[in-house]
Amino acid sequence: MSLLQAYLQNPSTRRVLNRKPGEKGFSLIELVVVIAVLAVLTAIALPNFLGVSDDAAARSAQQAAITAFKECQVFKARGQTAITDTFNNPSLADFKIESNAAGTGVGSAAATGKYECFTNAGAINSVVAIPKVANKFPTFYVETDGSKQCKTGTKAAGAKTYNIGCNTAAESTAVTSDAWK
């Protein structure tokens, strides 16, 4: 037996020589199974990722309200209590930060639409973070004494309400005096 005949009789050589052209790659069934597994994993993971951006928006609003209130406290500590002393209004996609008339309490609709730190009498205003889309997010308050409170959003029929940051699990129209999470 020659060397060539021995090579051709080898089982691994026979497998390679007997393979038909086009038998490389994955079968259609294998590709469909892989796509189905990826679709299931995406369906499970996607809702978790969507909630992350809403949570970040609520946390940004909370921090912006706190920062605005601290700016007003700095004015007061420096003896500046004029109504013209205003805090910097941050640019947020989902919230607007405004001053709330002093003494009106949580849940008051007395937001001024302005960014004034003080009333005409020199009393410090509270700061409110109001969601731009009504009831999608809670409304966050930093009261004149520095306490942090929130009012949860109201869930309308078929609407999604994200009560992120309030210490209450219930979705209600009632004002909560719970501090932020």
Image (tube, grey):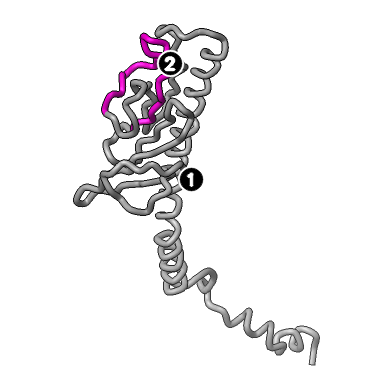
Residue drawn at point x = 41 percent, y = 67 percent: 36
Q: Is residue 132 above or below residue 181?
A: above
Decide whether residue 153 is among the magenta residues.
Answer: no
Please tell me which residue lies in front, 169 or 125: 125
Q: Secondary structure at mark 1?
A: loop
**Label 2: few (<14), some (14–19) or many (≥20) C-alpha neighbours in 10 Å:** many
Please tell me which residue lies in front, 43 or 104: 104
Residue 142, quarter of picture: top left
Residue 113, quarter of picture: top left
Q: Is residue 110 visible?
A: yes
Q: Is residue 152 left or right of residue 65?
A: left
Highlighted magenta segment, given as a residue range: 109-130
Q: CA distance from mark 2 to mark 1?
A: 25 Å
Q: Secondary structure at mark 2?
A: loop
Residue drawn at point x = 53 percent, y = 8 percent: 79
Q: Is residue 119 above or below residue 160?
A: above
- Image coordinates of residue 159 in percent, x first then y, are 24, 48
Q: Is residue 85 above or below residue 104?
A: above
Identify the residue under disc 1. 181
Q: Is residue 64 visible?
A: no
Identify the residue under disc 2. 117
Give the dominant element type of the magenta stretch: helix, strand or loop.
loop
Q: Which mark is residue 83?
A: none
Residue drawn at point x = 38 percent, y = 39 percent: 150
Please, what is the three-letter code of the amino acid marked with disc 1?
Lys
Please tell me which residue lies in front, 152 or 5: 152
